[in-house]
Amino acid sequence: MSKADQMQPKPSKANRACKSKKSIDPQNIAPAPYFHYTDRSREVDEDPLTPLAPPYRIPNFLVKLFCILSRDDLRHIIKWLPHGRSWRIIDPVEFEMSVIPTYFGHSSMNSFLRQVNGWGFKRMTQGRNK
């Protein structure tokens, strides 16, 4: 064995395993979506009068938002998109003047959007859901 052979480190088990695997073939990748999704947007609530928050507790932001989106009389202001996975504010001015003060105790669209972002919602800027 030469000195050069002695100086090179042996490959670890992880490196050997990676080298032995075949490269990924794009034709063998499953099509999107990569997750299981059940569309529940058209299901009817069996007990719509059951409160989403326990009595004597202030509902959190998500419960308030769901209540707003569930109201038929606000569909001209804010509504679910047809696939049921996202929602859209149709009339931002009316939303800021009538809906936000009723549910959130303030009338600031910026504050509402800050809460939306804080809960992890993402704005759709491309595609048919824009």
Image: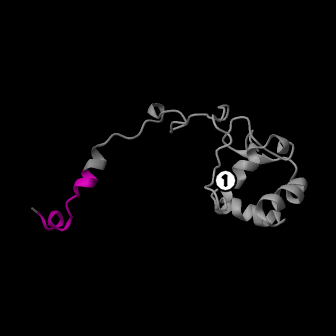
- The number of numbered badges drawn on the structure is 1
Residue 125 seen in the current view: no
Residue 127 location (% of width, % of height)? 73, 41
> In the visual, does 105 lie left or right of 5?
right
Please name the residue that numbered disc 1 is placed on: 63
Residue at the spot x=70%, y=59% of the render?
116
Question: Where is the C terminus found, in terms of image quarters?
Answer: top right
Q: Secondary structure under badge 1?
A: helix
Crowd rating for badge 1 (residues with CA inside 10 Å; few <14, some 14–19, many 20+) = some
- Depth check, front residue: 116 or 7: 116
The front one of 121 and 79 is 79
Residue situated in front as seen by the camera: 121 or 95: 95
Q: Residue furthest left?
A: 1
- Kind of residue at disc 1: Val
The spot of residue 67 in percent (x, y) is 72, 49
| Left or right: 33 in relation to 119 | left
Look at the magenta stretch and give its main secondary structure: helix
Residue 6, visible in the rendered structure: yes
Q: Quadrant of the N terminus?
A: bottom left
* Residue depicted at 31% across the width and 49% down the height: 18
Q: Which range of residues does the magenta coloring cover?
A: 2-16
Q: Is residue 124 magenta?
A: no
**Position in image of residue 71 (x %, y %):** 78, 43
Find out whether residue 12 is within the magenta segment: yes
Res. 107 image quadrant? bottom right
Residue extending farthest front: 56
Q: Is residue 30 left or right of residue 4?
A: right
Question: Which residue is drawn at the image coordinates 38% and 41% (left, top)?
Answer: 23
